[in-house]
Image: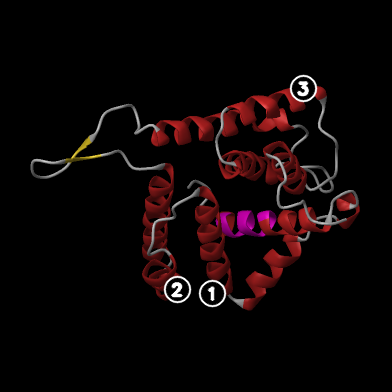
Amino acid sequence: MSLLPEGASFEELVQDYFLAVRGAGLMLSALDAQLLVSWAEAKVPFEVVARGIARSAEKAQFDARPGEPLLRSLRACRRQVDAEIRRYLQRAAGGTGTEEPESGAGKRKAKTWEETRHLRLRATLAQLAVEAPALTERVALLLERVLVQVPEEPSQADRQEALAFALLLRAMPWRNRRALWREAQGDPTSQAGLSARSRRLSRRFRLIALVRRRLGLTEL
């Protein structure tokens, strides 16, 4: 099966991502379709909803039985997705409407969703360097070269975070990397209904989630 067309709708992108993270092909139910419409009406970027889906799947990943889909329905992601949408809309509107005081006479606006996510990632990795001295050099490289600029949009934040964890994976011993790669492959039989793109997304999601779990970075 081919990739989604460049002009794919918000609903198509979310459904494709959900099936990829779920790890198995399945048409959405009528109730899931209604929920998807409500998210589309919120007018937020696809990546905001995708982040909520990913967080829901990560929480379910280590409770699922072998061969069992991580998520049974899109509705299982509702709490996490709704929380991400609220955070994004609040940040897009300047937080709660108040401004953060700045030293001196001026004031500055509340940080954007992308800025908040960027700062949280940098702070988390800085703490990781303290707790895992073997990764200090790699974390320093990430902070100095990869996580320098604040992403201007959610898709850039996704790519930046994925690259950071991919480089952390490469800093692990070969035996650990191989074990994580194998675990991330999932059950091929359950992915029979997925497109090639969805299978790649599924493996990438599982791998990053496993790296985060291995490093104790489940909350970002």
Task: Specify the label residue 138 is tagged with.
Answer: 2
Q: Describe residue 100's horizontal placement relative to residue 87 as left or right.
A: left
Q: Nearer the viewer, mark 3 or mark 1?
A: 3
Q: Earlier in the sequence, mark 2 or mark 1?
A: 2
Secondary structure under tag 1 reads: loop
One can see residue 216 in this view: no
Q: Earlier in the sequence, mark 3 or mark 1?
A: 3
Say what amino acid the circle numbered 3 marks: Leu
Q: Earlier in the sequence, mark 2 or mark 3?
A: 3
Measured from the top left, where is residue 57 in percent x and y? 67, 42
Q: Image point 68% across, 59% down: which residue?
A: 204
Measured from the top left, where is residue 109 in percent x and y? 27, 39
Q: Is residue 129 above or below residue 86?
A: below
Label 2, label 3: how far apart the Cα atoms are:
45 Å
Residue position for label 3: 31
Q: Are the two marked residues, 2 and 1, in contact with CB atoms closer than 8 angstroms? A: yes
Secondary structure under tag 3 reads: helix
Residue 52 shown in magenta: no
Say what amino acid the circle numbered 2 marks: Arg
Say what amino acid the circle numbered 1 marks: Ala
Q: Describe residue 28's horizontal placement relative to residue 115 as left or right.
A: right
Residue position for label 1: 171
Secondary structure under tag 2 reads: helix
- Other-residue count near label 1 (Cα within 10 Å), few / some / many at <14 / 14–19 / ≥20: some
The range drawn in magenta is 205-212
Residue lying at the far front of the rendered structure: 7
